[in-house]
Image (tube, helix red, strand yellow):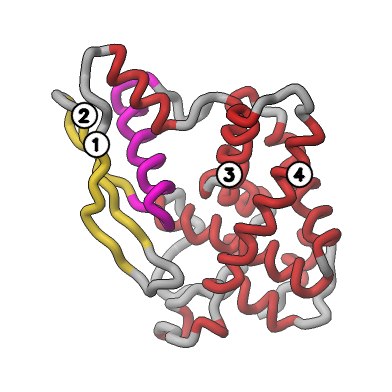
Amino acid sequence: MAFEAVEAALSHQFVDPSLLRRALTHASYGGGQTDVSVTYQRLEFLGDRVLALVIATALTARFPDADEGELARRLNHLVRAETCALVARRLAFEKHIRTDDLDVTKPTRAARAVLADVCESLIAALYLDAGLEKARTFILANWQDLMEEEGAARRDPKTALQEWAHARNKATPLYREIGREGPDHAPVFDIRVEVDGVEPVTARGKSKRDAQQSAAQQMLEREGVWSASR
């Protein structure tokens, strides 16, 4: 498979093409890969950290009067799976992901998770092949408009759900881990959030925190107090 279109989107021709190939390879490719050295899992881990560093640095410069809480909310909004998947779709990365058992062109939660992982993996591939400045250039070019979004500074879903529950004289939402899958280096968690008198919601994430945030947001959306488009 040729990846010239991906290189064009990244504005970089790889010295080591194997990095690009790995960043676009899901564990299911070829009937199921067991060797993490040929899939994007380890790259996704690194790319997540590179993305957070670049975004955090940019936010402190762009919003000099923001306190730590606002900066943290903005950072969480910009590095979350939904945002990474949005950037991936803007750049049509879904056309080039190598996977055997998942249609990443469909707007499903599973596809979004893979797109987010691939986006972070490509950032890591850029970083390893050309250094931090190349990765920074790509990130700032594609997250620039997202940094200015009004919703980026709002409270995170867990905080919003807790405030909503307390405003209705309900106890603090309870989060329960009800499942865990995947290897130790790349686990996937299933978390259920419970609020007195409200039907529970279960969500999945690459970390407990991501799953909790997703569950809280889904409950808020269902109750009509959080718009997914905000």
CA neighbours of label 2 inside 10 A, class few (<14), some (14 to 19), many (20+): some
Q: Earlier in the sequence, mark 1 or mark 4?
A: 4
Q: Where is 14 relative to 56, above or below?
A: below
Q: Earlier in the sequence, mark 3 or mark 1?
A: 3
Instruction: Identify the residue position indicated by label 1 in the image.
Output: 174
- What residue is drawn where x is 78% and y is 67%? 7
- Tell me if label 2 and label 1 are in contact, CB under 8 Å: yes
Quarter of the figure with residue 197: top left
Instruction: Identify the residue position indicated by label 3 in the image.
Output: 83
Mark 4 or 2: the one toward you: 4
Q: In front here: 196 or 81?
A: 196
Amino acid type at circle 1 is: Leu
Instruction: Identify the residue position indicated by label 2 in the image.
Output: 195
State which region is magenta: 204-225
- What residue is drawn where x is 17% and y is 31%? 199
Residue 33 lies, in percent from the top left, at 45, 84
Residue 11 lies, in percent from the top left, at 84, 61
Quarter of the figure with residue 151: top right
Amino acid type at circle 4 is: Thr
Instruction: Identify the residue position indicated by label 4 in the image.
Output: 57
Mark 3 or 4: the one toward you: 4
Quarter of the figure with residue 135: bottom right
Q: In front here: 120 or 21?
A: 120
